[in-house]
Amino acid sequence: MEDSTNFSEATEILYQGEDYSQHLKPEASPIYMTTAFNMGDLDDVQQTYDKKGYTYIRTRNPNRRSLGELISFLEKGKNTLICSSGMAAITTTYFALLAPGDHFLANENIYGETFDAINIFLKKMHVDVDFVDFSDLDAVKKAIRSNTRIVYTEVASNPTDRLADISALADIAHTKNALMMVDNTFTTPIGIKPLALGADIVISSLTKFMNGHSDALLGSITVKDEKIFDIIHSVRMLTGTSGSPFAAWLVYRGIHTLDLRVRKQMKNAALLAAALAKHPKILHVNHPSLDNFPQKELAKKLFKDKYTMTGMLSFEMPDDPSKINCFMNRLHLAHYAPTLGGIRTTLSHPLHSSHHHVPKDELKKMGISYGLMRISVGIEEADDLIADFTQALSVFSD
C-alpha cells in the first residue's frame, strides 16, 4: 500500500535530500561529521551492534576506520585505534592495560610529558615504576620483574635521538610475559616497523610526521592481538579519547604523501646534521646518521641506511642565552614551534617546552642542557637549510 502521508515544510526541511541509496565511489574520501548513524527496527539495531557497525561517534566512525586500516598496513599490525592525540594514545593504553600492583619499566630517555604522565598517573594507580637506561640491556634484564606488565620506549628518544634496540628489548619483555610498547613518532613506519621486530603495541602522535601539515591533533595505537585491541577500545570509548572525524580525515589525506615527505625530511636531517657537526661553534650534534654517533652499530641494525632514520635532530650550542636568541632571530627559514614533523623546519627548546617539568638530575641523564635545541627538519632544499643555519650560527663568532 502506497504511503501518501504529507508533512509540513518545516518538518520536510529536516529530511529532504537524504537519498544515499546510490553506490557512490568518490575520488576523495568524504568526511562523516555525524554524531550518530540511523538504524531501523530493533532487529536491525541488534544486528548493527553484533557486527560492530556504526552507531555512535565515540564508538566507531568511518574516517577513523579508514585511517586505522591504513596505519595498520604501514605498521604491519592487526588493528589500530585512533585517539584524540598522541598523549591520549599513550595514557589510554596505560589505563587499559595496567592495574595496581603491576610493574612498569620505562626507558629513562623519553618525551618529557610522557615522563610526567608516568609519574603522575601510574603512581596514583599504585603501579610500580622504574626508569632504566635502555641502551644497557643488562640493566633492563636486571630491572624487569615477574609482575612487569609493560616495557616502554621510544625508537629514537625525544630530543637526543638515543636509540632503543627494539628486537632485543622485546625478547627481554617476553621472558616475563610483559608487553613491549613502542612510540614510533620520531621515526614513523617509513623508517622502522617495531611490530615486525617483536613489539606488541606501537603508538604514534599522528599530529606530527604522519599528518605532516601541522593542522590536526590525533594519535594512534596499533596492536597485533585482537584481545588487547578490544580492551583498549573499551577504555578509549569510556574515557572519551576517540579522535574526531575531521582530524581523522585530515590525517588520512596527509598520510598519502607520507612516503614522499618523510623520506626527504630524513635525508635533509642527515645532511643538516653532518653540516652542523662540522661547525666550529657547535658543541655536539645528535643524529644516528653521524659517524660519531655513540650507537652507530645499532643505527645500522635498525635502519636501512643513514638517509632513512629520522627527520629529527638536536644540537648543543654554547650556554649563552643572548647569543642563542640572536641565533634564533637571524634564521630565515626555521622558526620556533612547540611541535614537530611538519613540512617546514621548526625549532624547539626542550627546557622551555617538552622537558620543562623534568627534574634537573633526570635532565642530566637525558643529555639535555640549556644550549640544546631540537630541530624538526622540513622538506626545504637541504642546501638552503644548511646555508641558513650556517649564517645564523655566525652570531657565536661575533
Image: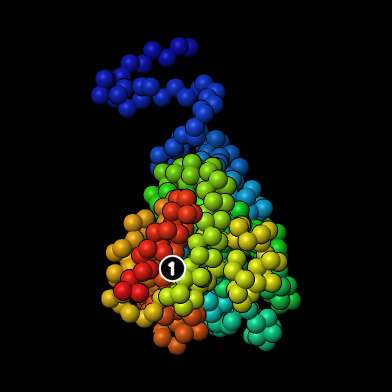
Left or right of 337? Residue 133 is right
> Whole-percent x and y of residue 220?
53, 56
User: Element type at marker 1?
Assistant: strand
Q: Can residue 207 be seen in this view?
A: no
Quarter in which the C terminus is drawn: bottom left
How many other residues sit within 10 Å of disc 1, few (<14), some (14-19) or many (≥20)? Answer: many
Q: Can residue 374 be seen in this view?
A: yes
Q: Which of 272 and 32 is in front in this view?
A: 272
Q: Is residue 353 placed above or below 379 in the rendered structure?
A: below
Please name the residue shown 56% across and 36% down the image. 43
Query: What colour-coding does the image apply?
Result: rainbow
Front residue of 331/243: it is 331
- Closer to us: 243 or 2: 243
Q: Where is residue 40 in the image (x, y as percent from the top left)?
A: 49, 32
What residue is shown at x 67% (from left), y 71% (from top)? 298
The residue carrying mark 1 is: 374
Q: Residue, x 37% and y 55% (percent of image)?
A: 333
Give residue 388's quadrant in the image. Answer: bottom left
Q: Where is residue 209 in the image (x, y as percent from the top left)?
A: 49, 54
Q: Is residue 231 above or below residue 354?
A: above
Name the residue type under label 1. Answer: Arg
Q: Nearer the viewer, residue 17 or 38?
A: 17
